[in-house]
Image (cartoon, helix red, strand yellow):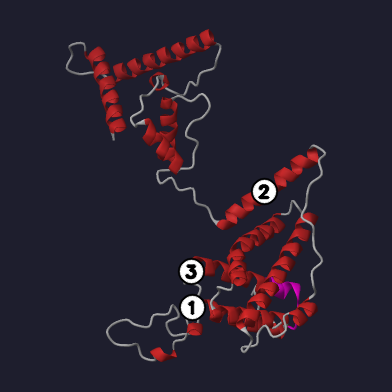
Amino acid sequence: MDFLKAELARKKAMVEEREKKLANGKSYVKRSEIDKYETERYYERCTKRKKMSSDDGKKEDLEEDVADQKEVKPLLEEAEVIKRLRERGEPIKLFGETPSETYQRLRSMEMQEPSGSKSQTDFKSAMEKIDQEYLKAMMMELHGDKVERKELKTLASIEEMKEICKGISDPDAETDKLFGIVRQFYRWLFDVYEQTGERKYRENEGDLTVKLERAKIKQAETYIRPLFRTLKKKTLDETLLRSFGEIAGALLDRNYIGANDVYLRTAIGNAAWPIGVTMVGIHARTGREKLFAHNVAHVLNDEFQRKYLQAIKRLITFAQRHFPTDPSKCVEFNA
């Protein structure tokens, strides 16, 4: 606000000075005289700039006004300027920067981005990470250095996983045992997903479609990590655990319609009010006793749950493409 007042005062002083020079005792000023005065001032500024550049041996920016070249006195204290820059994640001081220049840098950032939010989607972050890796690999190849690539492991087949994860969809399976089996299955399926994308990327590094697919894999890796953590610590809700076991059993049997049905039941729920509202007033809701945990939507409970449920949906889609089966057991994803 103080800066705005100072700017208005400066403009007002300029207008008063112009009128004082042009009026010269007259009660009016012609438009042509104003234009002539402004043109003369413009040429004066240009001449002054040329003289400064010839004296110093430097090129000055002719688009800036001479008044803007003077050092602006900061309207904020240095501590406040540092605080605001830190809130934006910007460096508090650049090399050779004066307090006035630091303040001007902050002011320009606040004008361009008032909220100071630099939030971006997870997918955009994944794309930027892949671009950085690609550029790094190109630079290493140009300098003749060896590009380090992730070693591809030999993974078990789906038939071998059937034997390892036997009883994963059994409703009477022991909970402690189920934690380990479910984690092992989804870890294996994600490794297959990741390695398939890595092979495609190495064959067609410049292809945009392959790059987008790899970004989705990176995003899914970030999303599913909290699920692996909760399975390892055995803190996942038992209802969700058994639902994930059902999905895994259907995927091992290549019954993708069944896996999709269980996923929808887990994510959206099949109750009349799937978000889980049971009490709306002083009276109990009709049929409240029919609402169980498996009828209530879990996708809206927590941000982490939403993310790893999305990652599991992506794995279901991948499994159908990677392990084909009869069309009667498939979901038409591209319909």
Q: Earlier in the sequence, mark 1 or mark 2?
A: 2
Q: Mark on residue 297?
A: 1
Residue 322 in magenta stretch: yes
In the picture shown, does residue 139 fall above or below 2?
below
**Region rendered in magenta:** 318-326
The reply to whether discs 2 and 3 touch (Cβ–Cβ < 8 Å) is no
Question: Is residue 175 visible to us here?
Answer: yes
Q: Amino acid at mark 1?
A: Ala
Q: Amino acid at mark 3?
A: Asp
Element under label 2? helix
Residue at the spot 51% in from the left edge and 30% down from the top edge = 94
Q: Which residue is mark 3?
A: 302
Q: CA distance from mark 1 to mark 2?
A: 37 Å
Q: CA distance from mark 2 to mark 3?
A: 31 Å
In the picture shown, does residue 26 fall above or below 235?
above
The reply to whether discs 1 and 2 touch (Cβ–Cβ < 8 Å) is no
**Percent x, y for residue 44?**
41, 12
Q: Mark on residue 327?
A: none
In the picture shown, does residue 107 fall above or below 288?
above
Residue at the spot 75% in from the left edge and 72% down from the top edge = 322
